[in-house]
Image (cartoon, helix red, strand yellow):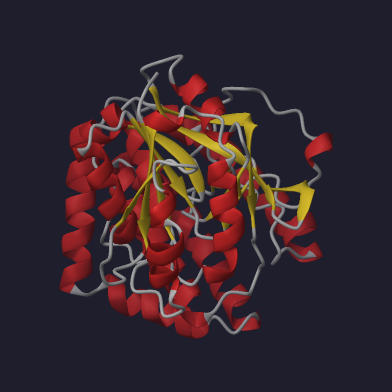
Amino acid sequence: MPKVAIIWVCYGNLKHLPEVVASWAALSYPRELLTIYIIPAASPDGIASVITSGVLPRSGKDLPKIVIINAPNRGFAANYNLGITAALKDGADYVYLQNGDLRLTPRTINEVVSLAKTSPLIGSVQSLVCYWHDEAKVNTSGCMVHPAGYAFARDNGRLRADLDLRRGEEITYSSGAAVLFSAAALAKVGLLEEGFFMYHEDVELGLRLRIAGYQNVLAPSSLVYHDYVFSGRTPQKFAWMELYRWLVILAYYRLPTIILLTPFLLAVELGSWLLAARGAGLAGKWYAYRELIKPRTWKLWFTMRRRAQSLRTVPDRAYLKFFTGKIEGQEISSPLIDNFINPIVDAIWRTLRLLIIW
């Protein structure tokens, strides 16, 4: 059986520590094949000292081997890359990213590994993420991408019993909250993009896997529970999402696709300004625009685009078929979006997608 590394970045997650550790102790995957890499990222809540005194002594006993990596907080991607790099150096066949506020179930790892082993073309396997305090309700069954670069959780808020989810069904990309990556795939395409401080890193890596010919799939029997609470879109959060969505589409769309979609993208951009004005997001929009014209952003975009195009083995039409013109199941939804904007935008996107033959 393969060696698996769990990467847990726990910035600000002291309150989740007892249940997270208890879930590790209950894992049914062979303990000698598991290593857990913990990255506190200089968390101000003192979690590093609690782990050192209370968790490390249990390493290799009632818990899998525990490795703690102390380093400054450098953002989601860079923090997780510390653990991934150490795990790959130690010979891990797969790495599993576990969000700081996410607990596993006994067969979480067994199920994702079992599915990943079925094909060398599987680059990532996402667990079925449900709510920590409402286990019957789904947080994400896989993630979706809008052609304008917006990313969102599929089936958020729906009851698990109401969903017909298939083992191994392809998803657009896997949520970074609970995902298994193949070491072989990461060796080919690279790790998380550290130019992104927070948000959209999993989108970018998921598309990078797709463009290189790998699949992102769902393991619905690999259950995890996420203490997710929608806290609204803070100006900084909204700003990062706005900036990174543009970088992703400009790095991954071929030039003919960009030309074809320009009127569509500009129309969506106008609509996003109107929604931003209603939701006090104008500061975030202006931040994204200012960042887009900076040399460091151009350098990051050029690096991402060159990497993506060098990895490309599939045409745009092959992965754009997974994109959707509807943004559904989100806390910011409204009757205007659900009943008017979504149907119109989705109809336009379906028509445009037919024209993408390259």
**Residue most toward the top?**
118
Dividing the picture into quarters, in which one does residue 226 lie?
A: bottom right
Left or right of 246 in this view: 172: right
The residue closer to the viewer here, 90 or 174, is 90
Dividing the picture into quarters, in which one does residue 356 lie?
A: top left
Q: What residue do we see at 58% from left, 74% from top?
A: 233
Number of dots carrying numbers:
0
| Relative to 328, residue 287 above or below | below
Left or right of 74 in this view: 348: right
Dividing the picture into quarters, in which one does residue 123 lie?
A: top left
> Image quadrant for the C terminus?
top left
User: Residue 210: image x %, image y %?
Assistant: 38, 32
Left or right of 334 in this view: 73: left
- Can residue 210 be spotted in the picture? no
User: Residue 180: image x %, image y %?
Assistant: 44, 36
User: Residue 81: image x %, image y %?
Assistant: 28, 52
| Relative to 211, residue 41 above or below | below
> Image quadrant for the N terminus?
top left
User: Residue 158: image x %, image y %?
Assistant: 78, 47
| Relative to 314, residue 264 above or below | below
The residue closer to the viewer here, 59 or 101, is 59
The residue closer to the viewer here, 35 or 78, is 35
